[in-house]
Amino acid sequence: MFTVMVVEDDLALRRMMCAFLGKHGYTTVPADDGESALDAIEKVMPDLVIADVMMPRMDGWELTRILRRMHPLLPIMLVTARDTLEDKRMGFSQGADDYLTKPIDLDELLLHVKALLRRSQAMTSHQLTIGETLLDYNALTATRGDTVLSLPKKEFYLLFKLLSSPMQIFTRRQLMDEIWGMDAQSDERTVDVHIKRLREKCEIFPDFAIVTVRGLGYKAEKRHG
């Protein structure tokens, strides 16, 4: 049983989302703003957080930034009526894993929730399968059939991060903060260098590709080999 926190200041929408997710087997924890969400997390740790962006006291961007620092692997989905490229860039740069625009389609919401929870389980199990390619977090290897590719830590972590959320766009800054952490004082072009190396090394794997998203960053795409 997964627990989903719904952070939304619109009472009617919050109740509707909680009721819908509850009907599909999820335990829900409602909160009306970012501060309330942080208070609730001290009592109940959710498996996923869905947060509106525009809220009083603490908005979704600030909540995401704080949660990402406190719980690096916690899946976070931002929900908002603001759907410009700059808004999405802001959300992803704060550490959001997904972005859904209003008005909310509940069936689409459910698909996103299921996908995020699957990715989260893959991250915590330390193994990830993309097509016929297996990534082993502990061994720092990518394996397909008899082909085994061993990678340096930073390159592997970068690949694992991208492939754990196919089609999710990650900014250079976000990747620097999450992969390099306290060492993230170097130029963001460090990410570009590692991406270039990964692309060259991973040409042997037809199951995925690393794609540049102009003006935003990078994402991984599943492909059929």
Image (cartoon, rainbow, N blue to C red):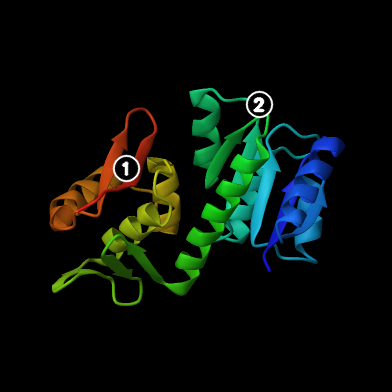
Outermost residue, bottom side:
139
**Front position in the image: 35 or 162:** 162
Q: Is residue 224 left or right of residue 170?
A: left
Asked if the residues shown at circle 1 and circle 2 are in contact, with their CB atoms under 8 angstroms apart, the answer is: no
Q: Measured along the vertical axis of the image, is residue 126 above or below residue 25? A: below
In the rendered structure, find residue 125 and report the number of the disc placed on it.
none
Going 29% across and 36% down the picture, which residue do you hit? 212
Tell me the quarter of the picture where residue 156 sits.
Answer: bottom left
Badge 1 amino acid: Asp
Q: Secondary structure at mark 2?
A: loop
Q: Measured along the vertical axis of the image, is residue 77 above or below residue 42? A: above
Q: Which residue is mark 1?
A: 187
Q: Is residue 48 left or right of residue 17?
A: left
Q: Measured along the vertical axis of the image, is residue 223 above or below residue 60? A: below
Q: Which residue is mark 2?
A: 81
Tell me the quarter of the picture where residue 140 sits.
Answer: bottom left
Q: Residues within 10 Å of mark 1 (few under 14, many from 20)?
A: few
Outermost residue, top side:
84
